[in-house]
Amino acid sequence: MSRSRKSIRQCGRDGGSGIGGIAASDEGLPEIGVVTKLRSKPHQFYSRILPRKSEGMPVSPVKMLAGREGNYSGRSRFTSADRCHLSSRYLPVNGPSVIDRMTSCAYVSQFSADGTLFVAGFQDSDIKIYNVDNDWKVKKNIRARSLRWTITDTSLSPDQRFLVYSSMSPIVHIVNIGSAMTESVANVTEIHEGLDFSGHDDDEEDDNSFGIFSVKFSTDGRELVAASSDDSIYVYDLAANKLNVRIPAHRSDVNAVCFADEAGHVLYSGSDDHLCKVWDRRCLGTRGVESGVLTGHLEGITFIDSHGDGHYLISNGKDQAIKLWDIRKMSSNARSNISIAPPRHIEWDYRWMEYPSHLRNRKHPNDLSVCTYRGHRVLRTLIRCYFSPSYSTGQKYIYTGSADAHIYIYDMVSGAQVAKLKYHDQIVRDCSWHPFDPMIGSSSWDGVIASWELKRN
C-alpha cells in the first residue's frame, strides 16, 4: 500500500466501541490492505486523463469509460481491479423490494455461487429456492423432514444439483433440487435422504440434545463439514455415505465451521467457548489437536467466514463485535490463553438479555485479532457475517445482520461503517451479497425476504 501504516485510518489498539470499527491490533492490517487495494485500484494509465486528480481519490466512472474507449491501458478493456474499483463504489442499499412474505421467522438466506438461485430457510420447516434470473419465482418449495426447532443451515452443492439442510437434530437431509417437481415434501413427493452425523452409540449420546448449527459442502462436492452442539466438528464422506471423522474440537457448542480455501485441507471453527480454531486435516491422524487457536472474543462466536486465501477469516461474536483474523498470528496453546482471559459474565444470556453497557469496553489481554468492527448487535440468535464478493468489490467490505433489524456494512481496512440498511421489523439473522451484481438479499424474523439494489457511494 502506498500510504504508510499510520495513514490507513488505522484502528487503535484499545478494542474500542461505537459505530465505527476499532482494531485490537494493526500489525497484520497493512498486508490485507495492500491486497484489497490492489484488487480495487484502477490501472495507472487512467491518470493520464486525470492529471489533476488527487492521489487516493476514486476515478470517475465516466472518465474510466472514456479511458477504456481511448485504450489508455493498452488492453481495450477493464481489468478485474478496474471493475472492482467501479462496482465497489455502488453499494446495494436502495429499496428494498419485497420478494416474499412468510408467517414464520427466516433463519437462512444465501445466493448460490453463480447468483442464479437464492435459498431461504424458515422456522416452520419451509425452505424456498428462488430463481433470481426469472423474476425471483419459486424454483423449489421444500418441506423439511424431522425438523427440530428450526432450519439452522442450508448448503448448495457446487454443481447446484443438491441442497442439504440441518436442524437441531443429528440427521442432515439432502435433496435433489434439479428435479422438475416444484413442491418437495419430504418422503411424500420426493426423497429427502438422511445423513446421520451423530457418530455415537445409542447409549452414549441423547439424540434429543444433539443439533447441527452449521453445515457446508466442500468445493469438490464430495464432503460435508458440520458444527454441532456436542462440541465437535464432523466430516461426512458423501461418496462412501458415511461419517469420515469426528473432531472433539471445543469445550462448548461449535456454532460455525467452514473450509479455509478450495483445497479443503484446513478448517476454521468457532464456538461458545469464545475461541476460533484452525484445523489441518492432514495432521489429525498424527497429532489429533488443533493447528492453532485465535483468542480475542470475550463471549461465544456465532459465525465465521473465510477470506478464501488460507490466511484471513472473520468471526461474529456475542460480545457485539466482528473480528478479523490472520491465522499466521494464531497461538498454539489454547489452555494458557483461556487461563488469562477475563471471566465470563455468567449472569448475562444473549438469548433474552441486552448486552450490559459496562461490559462493552472489556478487553481480552491476549487479543490476536487484526481488526474489530462494532455497531451491530448480536443477540437472541446466531447472527452471521461475511466478506463482500471478490468479483465486484475485491472483498473490500464486511457485512452482517443484526438484532436491531438492520444490515451493517463496514469498510474492511478502515473499520468505518459505510452503510446501514433499514427496513425489517425484527432480527436479521442472515443476508447475502450477490456474487456478481450489486444486490443484497436479506431475511428476517419478520418473515420477509427482501432484495436491496445499488446506490452510488
Image: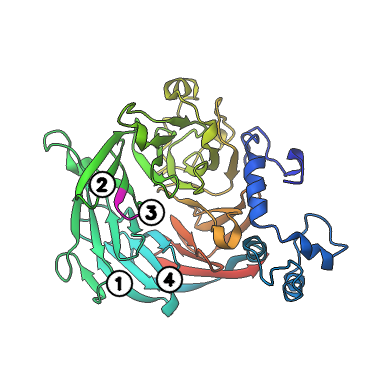
Residue 219: image tag: 3
Q: Nearer the viewer, mark 3 or mark 2?
A: 3
Q: Is residue 123 visible?
A: yes
In percent of width and height, residue 378 lies at 48, 46
The three-letter amino acid code for the residue at tag 2 is Tyr
| Marks 3/2: CA–CA distance | 14 Å
Q: Which residue is mark 1?
A: 140
Q: Is residue 437 left or right of residue 248?
A: right
| Residue receiving disc 2 | 236
Q: Earlier in the sequence, mark 4 or mark 1?
A: 4
Determine contact: label 4, label 1, CB under 8 Å: no
Q: Position of residue 339 (x, y in %)?
A: 45, 20
> SS class of the residue under badge 4?
loop
Q: Amino acid at mark 1?
A: Lys
The amino acid type found where label 3 is placed reads Thr
Q: Secondary structure at mark 1?
A: strand
CA neighbours of label 2 inside 10 A, class few (<14), some (14 to 19), many (20+): many
Q: Quadrant of residue 32?
A: top right
- Marks 1 and 3, how far apart at CA: 23 Å
Chief SS of the magenta region: loop
Mark 4 lies on residue: 116
Mark 2 lies on a secondary structure that is strand
Nearer the observer, 362 or 262: 262
Q: Residues in magenta?
A: 219-224
Residue 335: percent from left, percent from top:
42, 21
- Compute the Cα span from label 4 to label 3: 18 Å
